[in-house]
Structure formats: structure tokens, C-alpha cells
Image (cartoon, rainbow, N blue to C red):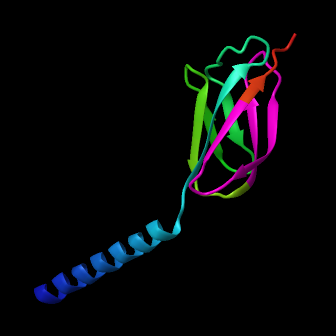
Amino acid sequence: MKTLFTVLVLVIAMLNVNATDVKNKTSKTTSISGKVTDKITGEALAGVKIQITGYNKTVYTDFEGNFKFDFSVEGNQILKASYISYEENTITNVNVETDSGNNLMVKLTPKL
């Protein structure tokens, strides 16, 4: 009985490893990165909310205005950048390709 249990555990472990290997080989990742600045002054903006519409993905810019998304979706995406006291900026037709660096420069206009 003990031997049967050991064999069963080994078989399950091997199946799990094979399933993980297949998943890792078939799922490709890509990224969208960029920098957000003030349209008038060119100053980097920290804490800007960047969203990919249609997905539950949100990131915020760092102290130098940089952001990065890592995910496994290809094709055209729509990004929204929003920040207090600035007009929301919607960037359409962001073409996302696997294994390529998709780098954007986003400029936000202050509300007057």
C-alpha cells in the first residue's frame, strides 16, 4: 500500500511538472512601458494612473514618471492616463507585439 501511494504521488508530480512546462512554453509575455510628463513644462509626473481599458490592469508612474505593464495580450490596446489637476489622456491603437519593447511618451495637459 505504501509503495502504491508513493508511485501515485510521483505520477501526479510528473504530470504537474509537464503541465507547467507546456504552459510556460505556450504563454508569451510582452510589456508596455513609457514615461509621463507635463505637456507644458516637460516635468516628469509621479503617481499618474495608467490603465489598459478592457483589462483589470492598472499601474502608477514612479518618481521619474516611468511605468511598465507586463502581460500576455497582443494586438491594439487603449491606455488611459489620469492625474489630479490634469486632463485625462486616452492613447488609442497602441500596437502590442510579443517580445518587443513597446515604449510610449505620454504628455498630460494641466487643467486651467
Please name the residue shown 34% across and 80% down the image.
Answer: 15
Where 43 sits versus 68, above or below? Answer: above
Q: What stretch of residues is rendered in magenta?
A: 76-105
Q: Is residue 77 left or right of residue 66?
A: right
Of residues 21 and 4, which is closer to you in this image? 21
The outermost residue toward the left is 2
**Where is residue 79 shown, x and y percent of the image?**
74, 41
Where 15 sits versus 83, above or below? Answer: below
Say which quadrant the N terminus sits in: bottom left
Please name the residue shown 79% across and 13% down the image.
Answer: 40
The question of residue 51 being in magenta is answered with no
**Where is residue 72 shown, x and y percent of the image?**
59, 57
The question of residue 86 being in magenta is answered with yes
Quadrant housing residue 107: top right
Please name the residue shown 65% across and 19% down the image.
Answer: 45
Of residues 8 and 32, which is closer to you in this image? 32
Where 2 sits versus 95, above or below? Answer: below
